[in-house]
């Protein structure tokens, strides 16, 4: 919850950059500068225009707009992570007990447990992320009101009510197939993390058996090894599977 609150503006920025409205603005801006830029300058300009959008949101819509969708995001973070960890841990134990003689360290056991956890979590929490995305993209309706800021949704409950009234209960599950594609990120994250964690445990065991004193490097790895493994696994999984987020955001229909 702390991480979600602190990084909420970046989450809003990411969601808007994925939308067609802001992509059209960026394409127009890039077309005017692309011819005069080398790849390094182009990359620098990309970061500049990205944070210009963040500043524009603050200037035009106010500071509160930087935290749009934070409510459903916070509501979703705890159950989503709880469901994911609970399902993963128990699936790994059950799969190992019934198919691998109790050995839960096999990579394919991690893979099967991660897929189970990913599908379960996506199914249970899809409505939450649907509402969050709708709220974050709410600014886009302004393009059809002559540039004036006109919000379609008052808050999370109003968003849910409008979706159910206009689109039915099934509207809350739009983008479910795309959400299932996100299982690939969860799966890759867990499998890589488990292998890195196993390597760290093996390294500690070898040091213990050798009888040598721990060096400063050993202490650093002991303190930061697991967090580094978790972060590295998440980074790699996110980069590899990121395109599914752009293609499959559960935005549903955005009436004018």
Image: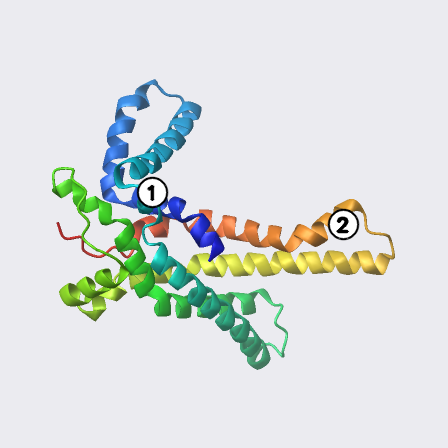
- Give the CA distance from mark 2 to mark 1: 44 Å
SS for tag 2?
helix
Mark 1 surroundings: few (<14), some (14-19) or many (≥20) residues within 10 A: few
- Decide which of 51, 234 is in the foreground and name it: 51
Which residue bears the numbered disc 2? 218
Mark 2 surroundings: few (<14), some (14-19) or many (≥20) residues within 10 A: some
The image shows residue 156, relative to residue 120, as above or below, that is above
The image shows residue 36, relative to residue 122, as above or below, that is above
SS for tag 1?
helix
Left or right of 17: which side holds 152?
A: left
Image location (x, y in percent) of residue 168:
17, 69
Residue 63, which numbered label? 1
Image location (x, y in percent) of residue 154:
22, 56
Left or right of 109: which side holds 44?
A: left
Quarter-wise, where is residue 208 in the image?
bottom right
Left or right of 177: which side holds 47?
A: right
The image shows residue 226, relative to residue 89, as above or below, that is above
Image location (x, y in percent) of residue 243:
37, 48
- Decide which of 60, 37 is in the foreground and name it: 60
Colour convention: rainbow
First of labels 2, 1 by sequence position: 1
Image location (x, y in percent) of residue 78:
45, 65
Residue 91, which numbered label? none
- Decide which of 96, 223 is in the foreground and name it: 223
Residue pictured at 56% horizontal, 56% vertical: 192
In the rendered image, the residue lying farthest to the top is 36
Residue pictured at 61% horizontal, 72% vertical: 104
């Amino acid at each position: 919850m702390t991480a979600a609150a602190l990084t909420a503006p970046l989450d809003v920025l990411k969601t808007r950059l994925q939308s067609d409205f802001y992509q059209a603005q960026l394409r127009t801006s890039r077309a005017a500068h692309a011819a005069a830029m080398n790849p390094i300058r182009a990359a620098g300009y990309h970061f500049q225009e990205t944070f210009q959008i963040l500043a524009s949101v603050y200037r035009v819509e106010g500071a509160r707009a930087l935290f749009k969708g934070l409510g459903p995001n916070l509501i979703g973070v705890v159950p989503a992570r709880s469901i994911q960890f609970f399902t993963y841990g128990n699936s790994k134990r059950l799969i190992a007990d019934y198919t691998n003689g109790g050995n839960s360290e096999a990579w394919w056991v991690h893979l099967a447990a991660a897929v189970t956890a990913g599908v379960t979590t996506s199914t249970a929490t899809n409505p939450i992320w649907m509402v969050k995305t709708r709220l974050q993209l709410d600014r886009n309706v302004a393009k059809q009101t002559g540039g004036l800021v006109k919000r379609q949704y008052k808050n999370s409950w109003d968003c849910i009510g409008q979706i159910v009234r206009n689109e039915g209960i099934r509207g809350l599950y739009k983008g479910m197939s795309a959400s299932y594609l996100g299982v690939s990120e969860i799966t890759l994250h867990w499998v890589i993390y488990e292998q890195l964690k196993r390597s760290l445990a093996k390294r500690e065991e070898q040091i213990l058996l050798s009888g040598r004193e721990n060096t400063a490097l050993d202490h650093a790895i002991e303190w930061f090894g697991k967090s580094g493994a978790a972060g590295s696994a998440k980074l790699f999984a996110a980069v590899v599977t990121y395109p599914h987020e752009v293609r499959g955001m559960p935005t549903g229909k955005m009436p004018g």
